[in-house]
Image (cartoon, grey):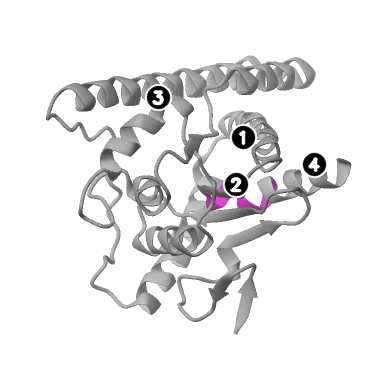
Amino acid sequence: MTHLAGIDVDADPRITGEYLRQIPGGPGALTLVGVVHDHPASTYRTQRVIKELDPTVLALELPPISIPLFEEYAATERSPPVFGGEMSAAIQAAAPNTAVGIDRPTGGFFQRLGRELLQERPPAETVRNVLSNTLSTTKHALLCRVAAILAARTSIRLEVDSPIAYDIDWTDSPEDQALDERKQVRRSRSFMNAFRTSNRSRASQLEDAAREADMATRLLALREQEDVVAVVGISHLDSLTERLDAGTNAV
C-alpha cells in the first residue's frame, strides 16, 4: 500500500494519488484534493482526506463571501449534506471555523485578470467573454451571500445550485463510483475541446490563469503558519500544483 503523508491510498479506489497532490516545503503541510463537482466519489474522497489529516485550515474553491452559505448547508446531521456537494461535505468533515474561500471574485483576482488582459491584448470578443464570465460569477457569489443571510435569519434554505445528476450514487460500489468519476473527467475535457469557440477558450484560459495565480498565492500564504487541505476542481489540479511548486522553490 502506498501513502501520501498520512493518507492510505489504493485501499479504496476513490482514494488514489491520481487526484491528490501534496506540496513539499513550507512550515505547514499543503494537500490538494481534486474533485468532480457533486460527484459521490469526489465527496467521499474529500471527507476521508480531511478526517485523516485534520487540517488547521480548509481552503475551498469558493468565493470568500460564499462560505457562510456552505457552512449553513453543512450544519445538518445528514452526512454528506443534501446541499452544497463536496464543498459543504468538506466543511462538515473539518473542525469548526476552519473553512476559507480562495476563489474569485477577490481583489487579487481582478488585479491579475486586468494585468493579463493588458499584457495579452486579446480580440474584443475575447474581452467581452472574459467580462461576461466575470460578471456572472460575481453575481452568483453575491446570490450565495444573500442566501446565507436569509438562512441565518429564517428557516428558509435556498438551493442556489441544482446538484449535478450522475449515472451512479451512494448505493453503487466504490469501484463503480471511481470508474464513473474518471469517465466524467474524460467527458468534460472532450466537451470543452470540441464545443468551445477559440474566443471562448482563450477567455477561459485568461480567467483561469488569474484564478489559479491568485489561489496559489493565497495557499502559499496560508501554509506559512498552518496545515492546509485545499479542495479544488480536477481541471485546476495540475496547473495549480505547478504554480505552488514554483512558488515554494522561489521562497
- The residue closer to the viewer here, 188 or 69, is 69
Q: Mark 1 points at which residue?
A: 208
Figure quadrant of residue 155: top left
> Which of label 2 and label 4 is nearer to you?
4
Label 4 residue SS: helix
Q: Earlier in the sequence, mark 2 or mark 4?
A: 2
Q: Which of marks 2 and 1 is nearer the N terminus?
A: 1
Q: Are marks 2 and 1 in contact (CB under 8 Å)?
A: yes
Label 2 residue SS: helix
Q: Distance between the residues labelled 1 and 3?
A: 17 Å
Circle 3: residue type: Ala
Q: Which of marks 1 and 3 is nearer the N terminus?
A: 3
Q: How far apart are marks 4 and 3 (CA)?
A: 28 Å
Magenta highlight range: 233-239
- Residue 188, placed above or below residue 222: below
Q: As drawn, is 124 to the left or to the right of 83?
A: right
> Which of label 1 and label 3 is nearer to you?
3
